[in-house]
Image: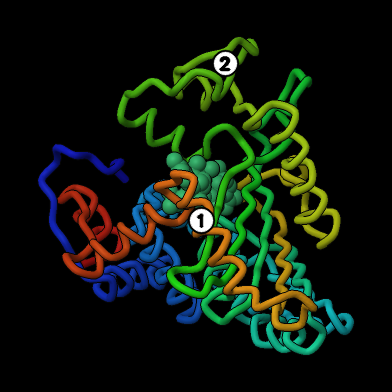
Amino acid sequence: MSAPSDHAASCTLSFDALVSLLEKIFLRHGTSTEVARCLAENCAGAERDGAHSHGVFRIPGYVSTLNSGWVNGKAVPVVEDVASGFVAVDASNGFAQPALAAARPLLVAKARSAGIAVLAIRNSHHFAALWPDVEPFAYEGLVALSVVNSMTCVVPHGADRPLFGTNPIAFAAPRADGEPIVFDLATSAIAHGDVQIAARKGELLPPGMGVDSLGQPTRDPKAILEGGALLPFGGHKGSALSMMVELLAAALTGGNFSFEFDWHNHPGAKTPWTGQLLIVIDPSKTAGQNFAERSQELVRQMHGVGLRRLPGDRRHRERSKSNEHGITLDEQTLAQLRELAGI
Ligand SMILES: NC(=O)C1=CN([C@@H]2O[C@H](COP(=O)(O)OP(=O)(O)OC[C@H]3O[C@@H](n4cnc5c(N)ncnc54)[C@H](OP(=O)(O)O)[C@@H]3O)[C@@H](O)[C@H]2O)C=CC1
Ligand SMILES: O=C(O)C1=NCCCC1
């Protein structure tokens, strides 16, 4: 799939039209109708919000993975009611998003009754942005935190060779006036998807993102992708967070660490076979003042000291633009999607 370009001829389509196109692609490549809908909405949502590293750019990777037999596109997740504040799901070697969808009602009920609940997803594949997994909880007045590990491509701070994944952390919290506060960030200096996009565009990366196959710093995305590796963001601090993600998303859930799965017998496989953890908190159960008012006050104070952009602001601007004018894709990308959909 070509990377978004400012110069290519483009066309626009509605969110629903994009979901329906992506749904056809997933169905044509062996998913169930439920999985197709779930992944299509997730991927179209990322594209709508300008999260291009995890929008339609990912579709060929989904397709080649499904074709390789690495993931079960028809997997039925098995939800386990483990304890008062704990839900587990065996994603049955399927995608993580349908597993979350299956466990969501029980997770929310537990969070509302106990004040906090944990969801441990294992045996799952996450190939998407993480914010769609947490943002909906904040729209329901809940606070949510999620972590997912991926595939070995990040050198732990102070080490010689890669071990960690790009391991994102996403957080969402409601506020009284405005969109929820949401951030979603890879614990690597740059997401793997953005390195791939830079490589396709022939662009250099900023310094400090990765190393080549000899462990030497490089700005060449191809050198990173072909035998090189990424660095954690913020040196030892990002490295510690990435280690935490491995522990929470894999050790705690029963999923694989980023270095534990071997996809070499499945040429074309791209989706990490790991785990994911979500923590959901009902702030109405805390002894403090109204949470949404307090988070609004924090935002007010941040704006008061000159802050112009909150995490999530850019996405919401892109979302509004897409909702008003449609989602813009270049013609080549749309043609590729139609071909994959068989239309
Ligand atoms: N499934 C997987 O295994 C993996 C998925 N990913 C996904 O890749 C995506 C990209 O990650 P990453 O490249 O780290 O994200 P970015 O560095 O682009 O953004 C990280 C966060 O910071 C915010 N932000 C960015 N710039 C500013 C700014 N100047 N001021 C205030 N806030 C800012 C963003 O908000 P905004 O969105 O509004 O710009 C976002 O919430 C994520 O969605 C992540 O989940 C990454 C690794 C692995
Ligand atoms: O961009 C990334 O980094 C990743 N995205 C999807 C899963 C693999 C890592």
Q: Which mark is residue 212?
A: 2
Q: Residues within 10 Å of mark 2 (few under 14, many from 20)?
A: many
The percent position of residue 319, horizontal first and vertical second, equals 32, 63
Residue that label 1 marks: 129
Q: Residue at x 72, y 37 (%)?
A: 164
Please indicate whether residue 335 sits to the left or right of residue 315 in the image.
left
**Residue that lies at the very extreme toward the right in this rendered image:** 83
Residue 122 in the image: above or below residue 329 = below
Task: Mark 2 and ligand 2: say if the CB distance to the nearest ligand atom is below 8 Å.
Answer: no
Can residue 210 be seen by looking at this rendering? yes
What is the quadrant of residue 203 in the picture?
Answer: top left
Q: Nearer the viewer, mark 1 or mark 2?
A: 1
The percent position of residue 172, horizontal first and vertical second, equals 58, 64
Q: Residue at x 25, y 69 (%)?
A: 323
Type of amino acid under label 2: Asp
Can residue 99 be seen by looking at this rendering? no
- As measured in the structure, the alpha-carbon distance from the residue carrying label 1 to the one carrying label 2 is 26 Å
Q: Residue at x 41, y 71 (%)?
A: 41
Per the image, label 1 sits on a secondary structure element best described as loop
Q: Residue at x 27, y 43 (%)?
A: 4
The percent position of residue 153, horizontal first and vertical second, equals 64, 33
Query: Could you say which is closer to the camera, residue 274 or residue 72?
Result: 274
Q: Earlier in the sequence, mark 1 or mark 2?
A: 1
Per the image, label 2 sits on a secondary structure element best described as loop
Task: Mark 1 and ligand 1: say if the CB distance to the nearest ligand atom is below 8 Å.
Answer: yes
Where the C terminus falls, by quadrant? bottom left
